[in-house]
Amino acid sequence: MIELVPLLAILLALIFARIDIAFAIGTVSYLWLFIAGESMTTGVTRIFSGLNSFVLLAIPFFLLAGELMNNSEITDRIVRFANYTIGRIRGGLAQANVLASLFFAGITGAAVADVAALGSVFIPSMTEEGYDQDFSSAITAASSIVGPIIPPSIIIVIYGSVTSTSIGALFAAAVVPGLMLGAALMVITGVLSVRQNYPSHSPDVPRGEVPSLIFDSLVALTMPAIILGGILGGVFTPTEAAAIACVYALLIGGVFYRTLGRDDIRESLSVTLERSTQLYAIIGFASILSWMLAKEGITRELAAALIEMGLGPIAFMLVIGLVLLFVGTWLEIGAAAIILAPTLASIAQTLGIPAYQFGIMFIVTLNFGLITPPLGICLFAASSVSERPVWEISKKIVPFYVADIAVLLAIIYFPELTLAFPRLAGF
């Protein structure tokens, strides 16, 4: 067996050197193929095999739908609606930040997009209202990880594809944990706002505009309802749902709001092409790495070692949770899912852990890496918006991290949180 440690060290070195994650994984994968004496064409074959999935076609469609909605100025409508709904309480602007992330999650399904879109609105506004700038950045980053959990979610599509788990069922299973994360963040925000005496916020919305504000927001929030309802109702597949979401976004932006022009559509397509290419490169190269791990027997030995530990279902998930917290800090979550999910999901099934419970635990834990220092990408995104040091933001994010861990433990100890909704949907 080829020694794995040097290759892992090279991968970490490339990541710390800020080499694009796809190229870092690709470099290590092809280096491993070369050392193992495999043909270089084997890498091409594995890339094609990893990408040859109808389900993965949903990724660019979901990305495009999110970009079209963003360019339709929907962010401003969501922010105004969130402010109007909850802004009047103590720390209202911070609470509106979390609520807007919950709404935004159903449109983009991407954490970094959440930070970029909402952070540019909320961080300056909160600072002007007297909030600590590091706190404003921290709550924006912390609430952003709800995006990849609440449907539509790209990481759920990837996980479902590599583990052959129903994506519709995973979407259903993610709803309650996603809402719980949002609620937990709002509780922590409320406590901190009272302690720091942060102000309430009086939204400047004339009474006559309230019905229009509510209607506009509901029109925007109908998209995730169409996606989830259509999939759970068996009307269309996740890929078809993603395509329908694009059509809906075009109609909303181009016909209903009339805020989506040709330049906006061109920009949306350009961004979607760039992000899709990045994701597909990660998936393809990670497929080589996953295949090599299996071929060299490393995944088999890992599975045997974990089973020999004699862990029960809860202990197993706690141990895997700690591992995923570490992995999610430095490895892109899509790549981590492709490399680790098939083996770990198989072991979980052997231990009698429900597939949907383990899948959501896996996804939620990996997402915590997005806000875990020193490499959490959402911390850097918030730092870029606020121009505050990542370390200072990291200090303020600790209470929110504790709330996230509490939700994770609830998912592990109470399986019905992830099983009830899929069962109701007939899965």
Image: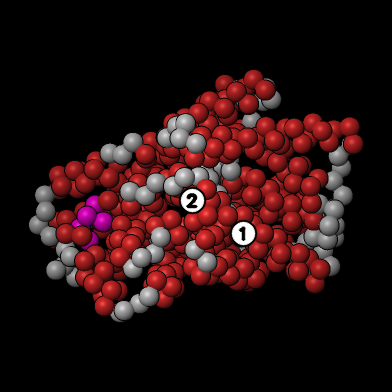
- Answer yes or no: do the residues labelled 2 and 1 have beta carbons within 8 Å? no
**289 is within the stretch colored magenta:** yes
Which quadrant would residue 222 be assigned to in this image?
Answer: top right
Residue 131 position, x and y percent, is 78, 61
Callout 2: SS:
helix
Which residue position holds label 1?
180
Q: Which residues are magenta?
A: 288-293
CA separation in Å, label 2 and label 1: 19 Å
Viewer can see residue 80: yes
Kind of residue at badge 2: Arg
In percent of the image, x 76 and y 42: which residue is there? 81
In percent of the image, x 30 and y 61: which residue is there? 346
Which quadrant would residue 401 be assigned to in this image?
Answer: bottom right
Residue 289 position, x and y percent, is 25, 56
In percent of the image, x 39 and y 71: which residue is there? 313
Viewer can see residue 66: no
- Give me the disc on residue 72: none
The tag earlier along the polypeptide, 2 or 1, is 1
In percent of the image, x 75 and y 32: which residue is there? 215
Position of 137 compared to 270: left or right? right
**414 or 374, nearer to the observer:** 414
Label 2: how many Cα within 10 Å (few below 14, some 14–19, many 20+)? few
Residue 357 position, x and y percent, is 45, 60
Label 1: how many Cα within 10 Å (few below 14, some 14–19, many 20+)? many
Position of 157 compared to 148: left or right? left
Which residue position holds label 2?
423
Applied colour scheme: secondary structure
**57 is within the stretch colored magenta:** no
* Number of marks drawn: 2
Kind of residue at badge 1: Met
